[in-house]
Image: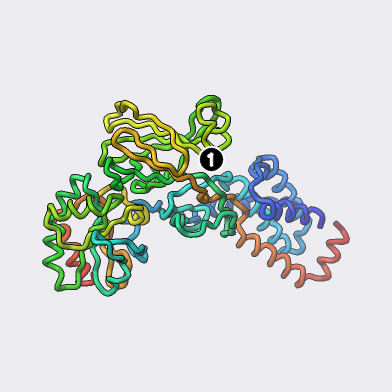
Amino acid sequence: MLLAALVVLGVVIEVVVPGRAIYHAGWYNVALAALAIWAIASLRRVPLVAFGIGAIAFAGIASGLLGPDTRTVIGAPGTSLRVDEAGGTLVFPPLHVDQPIGASRFTATALLRSVPRTVVAIAAFDRRGAHLTITQPTGAAFLSPVLLMQNTQTIAGFTLPYDTFAVPAAHRIVKAVLFSAAQAASMPALSMVRGSVVLFDLEDDTGASIPHGIGVAPEGQLIRLGDLGLRATVMSYPAIEVTSIPDLAVLAAGFLAILIGALLTRRPWRGKIGKL
Amino acid sequence: MNPRTRWLLIVAAAAIALIILVPLFRSQGPSVSGPAGMAGQAAPVFSLHDDRGAVVSLAQYRGKIVVMNLWASWCPPCRAEMPDLQTVAREYAKDGVVVIGVNQGESAARASAFARSLEIAFPIWIDDGQQYGRVYAALGLPTTVVIDRLGAVERGFDGPLTIEQMRSTITQAVRGT
């Protein structure tokens, strides 16, 4: 009985406290398998209970050995991404709706949690102030003006997120590097600015630098670099953290088998408990 | 072989079989990419302004077949495709087909001037937040999405279409095939 309880505990904890690296460790799963085999052998006279323990152990070991490590799925607002662990498609909400940051949801084999991420929405304008199209030829969504800032580079000892976008009508490729408020405050050149700062670096569409094509703009303020006006708005947008867990259907079947087995073989089960 | 050993072997064999078999039953569906991946889904709807400033929405075209073309004035294939869209808009109007050009990210003045220069008579909408481009997973411009009378995406196309492709697609949509 103690062995069976240890097996159940070792698997259930993967659901209650998900995402720990230890669950994917080989020794953890070998120990779980050894305990399960021992428990099943001890419970062979109550086969339904033994089956239930086996099913629960299997769910835990399969998740530990085959389930992917915890990963974060990042999508542009309004886009959809197929996530096999989630058993479906994740739809990322438009920017103007309330963002469900902090929400969590179980699927059969994964726990999905929305976690905040900093993204930058860009607006571009021509010399007369007319709106221009933003594209992201190498981004997650070609026609999105929202930069997901998935790359990093080091400037002055800070690791800073950056992204690139194109303004095809102006024949410009723009790199945007984000400094947080704290990072900006600690840099002499930016210390007068309050809040986040975005550094823009312009090239033409052949990759050549543009004279006076580098500038920094406080978040939300328009900056003019040559013929192009740019405004960056820094905002929080959810990413989805996907954590694999033991298959809930298999766990439920295991617990059901244990329950039915215990009820059907009440006396022998009690005797078995006494022996264990 | 004693019963205990036999039991252990059976359990081990079952565990191994399950570990091998379960991943095979996991969903391995393709990633959604491009406007073609939207087929069969309800067409997302946003309120926008047209090039004259009126509030417009796809919802007002429920019951009609909508050919929604995402475009921008800086895009040469969009320019090349526009006259053919105007031709099919005129040819299929009697069948309840509406062509809408949704400009991506540009000002109303620029979009309107571009449409006038090509003598475009179908509605031009201004999507300066590029919402339709994002949601319909546009991989480039132009992107064309055909929406059926019930408001579901029937087909999606990445890149320019020839007038024969437009006629064939719209004819199928009108026939409901």
Whether residue A104 is visible, yes or no, is: yes
Residue B90 placement, left or right of B6:
left
Work out whether B78 lies above or below A266.
Answer: above
For mark 1, give the secondary structure.
loop
Residue B68 point in image, percent of width and height: 25, 60
Whether residue B6 is visible, yes or no, is: no
Residue at 59% x, 54% y is A102
Closest to the observer, A90 or B44: B44
Q: Residue furthest front?
A: A192
Look at the image and tell me in which quarter the N terminus of chain A lies. bottom right
Callout count = 1
Residue B110 point in image, percent of width and height: 22, 50
Residue A225 point in image, percent of width and height: 34, 34
Amino acid type of disc 1?
Gly
Residue A198 point in image, percent of width and height: 45, 36
Residue at 68% x, 42% y is A22
Residue at 67% x, 57% y is A56
Closest to the observer, B64 or A196: A196
Q: Write down the residue under mark 1.
A: A195
Work out whether A156 lies above or below B107.
Answer: above
Work out whether B131 lies above or below A123.
Answer: below
Closest to the observer, B15 or A102: A102
Q: Please, which colouring scheme is shown?
A: rainbow
- Quarter of the rendering containing residue A265: bottom right
Look at the image and tell me in which quarter the C terminus of chain A lies. bottom right
Residue A58 placement, left or right of A89:
right
Q: Residues within 10 Å of mark 1 (few under 14, many from 20)?
A: some
- Quarter of the rendering containing residue A221: top left
Residue A36 placement, left or right of A186:
right
Q: Identify the chain of the residue marked 1, using the numbered disc in the image.
A: A
